[in-house]
Image (cartoon, rainbow, N blue to C red):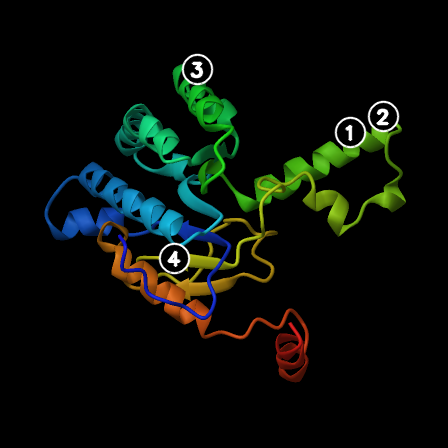
C-alpha cells in the first residue's frame, strides 16, 4: 500500500466498534460464525492501513462484557476463533513490529486462552510500531470501576488521601493509560451508539458512524473515515477563533 492519500490531519489513536458480522452472514444465508471469520480479514486490513498511515494505536472492540449473553454456540465459536487468530496472526504482528495488548477482564477466559494471550503479549512487548489493542470481555463501566477500586485500595493502604483523587489520578489506572487518548471512534453497521466502549477515554473523541458492515469495511472505508476526521475542527472547549489563532502560531 504505497499510494497513501494525503490528509490534513490524522488521528493518533483509532478505536473501532466492529459491528455487523451477524447481519453480513445472515444476508448470505451463512451461520453467524462465518461473519465473524470474514471480520478477521477486515481486522487485517485495518491493522495494515493504520500501521502504514502512522497511527500510533488501534483499539478494536472484539468482545464486550455483555456479549456473554449471546447464544452459547456463538460464544464458544468466538472463543475458538480468538484462539485461532492468536495462533495464526501473532508471528505476523511481531514480524511487522506491532505490539499486541488485550484489555478487559481476562479472568473469565479459559486458562488455555489466557496463556495464549500472555504469550502473544510477551512476544510483541518490545515492538515499537503500531500498538494493537484488542478489547475482549471489556466494558467501559468495568474499566472505571476497576480503576476506582485500585484507588480505594491505595487509600486503605495509606498511600493516598481521598482529597488527592481527581480525574488524573483515576485516569492513570484505566486501560490504555500509557497510550494517547482515542481521537477517532469508528462504528460500523449503522448503529449510532458506543455500547459501553471506552466511556472515559471517549470524552473528546470524534465519532464516525457508517452503515458499512464490518466484513465489508476496507481500506477505502478507512480512508473515508480519515477524510471526515481531517475536516473536523477539534476545539476541546475553546472557541474556533482561539483554535485558529493557535494554529497560525504553531
Marks 4/1: CA–CA distance: 35 Å
Drawn side of residue 233 relative to residue 63, left or right:
right
Residue indicated by mark 1 = 153
Element class at badge 2? loop
Element class at badge 3? helix
Element class at badge 1? helix
Residue indicated by mark 4 = 187
Marks 2/4: CA–CA distance: 41 Å
Drawn side of residue 43 relative to residue 196, left or right:
left
Q: Are marks 2 and 4 in contact (CB under 8 Å)?
A: no
Q: Indicate which disc, 2 or 4, sits on the residue closer to the N terminus.
A: 2
Rendered location of residue 137, percent (x, y): 46, 35
Rendered location of residue 106, percent (x, y): 49, 27
Rendered location of residue 171, percent (x, y): 69, 45
Vertical side of 237 occupied by 184: above or below: above
Q: Are marks 1 and 2 in contact (CB under 8 Å)?
A: yes
Rendered location of residue 191, percent (x, y): 36, 61
Q: Which mark is residue 157?
A: 2
Element class at badge 4? strand
Question: In which quadrant of the rendered view does residue 62 lie?
Answer: top left
Marks 1/2: CA–CA distance: 6 Å
Residue at point 45% right, 33% down? 100
Residue indicated by mark 3 = 111
Between 60 and 98, the one nearer to me in the picture: 98
Amino acid at each position: 500500500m504505497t499510494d497513501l492519500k494525503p490528509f490534513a490531519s490524522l488521528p493518533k489513536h483509532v478505536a473501532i466498534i466492529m459491528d455487523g458480522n451477524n447481519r453480513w452472514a445472515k444476508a448470505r444465508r451463512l451461520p453467524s460464525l462465518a461473519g465473524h471469520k470474514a471480520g478477521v480479514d477486515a481486522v487485517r486490513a485495518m491493522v495494515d492501513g493504520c500501521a502504514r498511515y502512522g497511527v500510533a494505536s488501534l483499539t478494536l472492540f472484539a468482545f464486550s462484557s455483555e456479549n456473554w449473553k449471546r447464544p452459547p454456540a456463538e460464544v464458544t465459536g468466538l472463543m475458538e476463533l480468538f484462539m485461532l487468530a492468536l495462533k495464526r496472526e501473532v508471528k505476523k504482528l511481531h514480524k511487522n513490529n506491532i505490539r499486541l495488548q488485550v484489555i478487559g477482564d481476562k479472568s473469565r477466559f479459559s486458562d488455555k486462552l489466557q496463556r495464549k494471550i500472555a504469550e502473544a503479549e510477551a512476544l510483541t512487548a518490545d515492538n515499537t510500531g503500531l500498538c494493537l489493542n484488542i478489547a475482549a470481555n471489556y466494558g467501559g463501566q468495568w474499566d472505571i470501576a476497576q480503576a476506582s477500586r485500585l484507588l480505594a485500595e491505595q487509600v486503605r493502604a495509606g498511600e493516598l488521601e481521598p482529597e488527592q483523587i481527581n480525574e488524573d489520578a483515576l485516569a492513570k489506572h484505566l486501560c490504555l493509560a500509557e497510550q494517547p487518548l482515542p481521537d477517532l471512534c469508528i462504528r460500523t453497521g449503522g448503529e449510532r451508539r458506543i455500547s459501553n466502549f471506552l466511556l472515559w477515554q471517549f470524552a473528546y473523541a470524534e465519532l464516525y458512524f457508517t452503515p458499512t458492515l464490518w466484513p465489508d469495511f476496507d481500506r477505502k472505508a478507512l480512508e473515508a473515515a480519515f477524510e471526515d476526521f481531517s475536516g473536523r475542527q477539534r476545539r476541546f472547549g475553546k472557541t474556533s477563533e482561539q483554535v485558529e489563532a493557535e494554529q497560525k502560531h504553531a
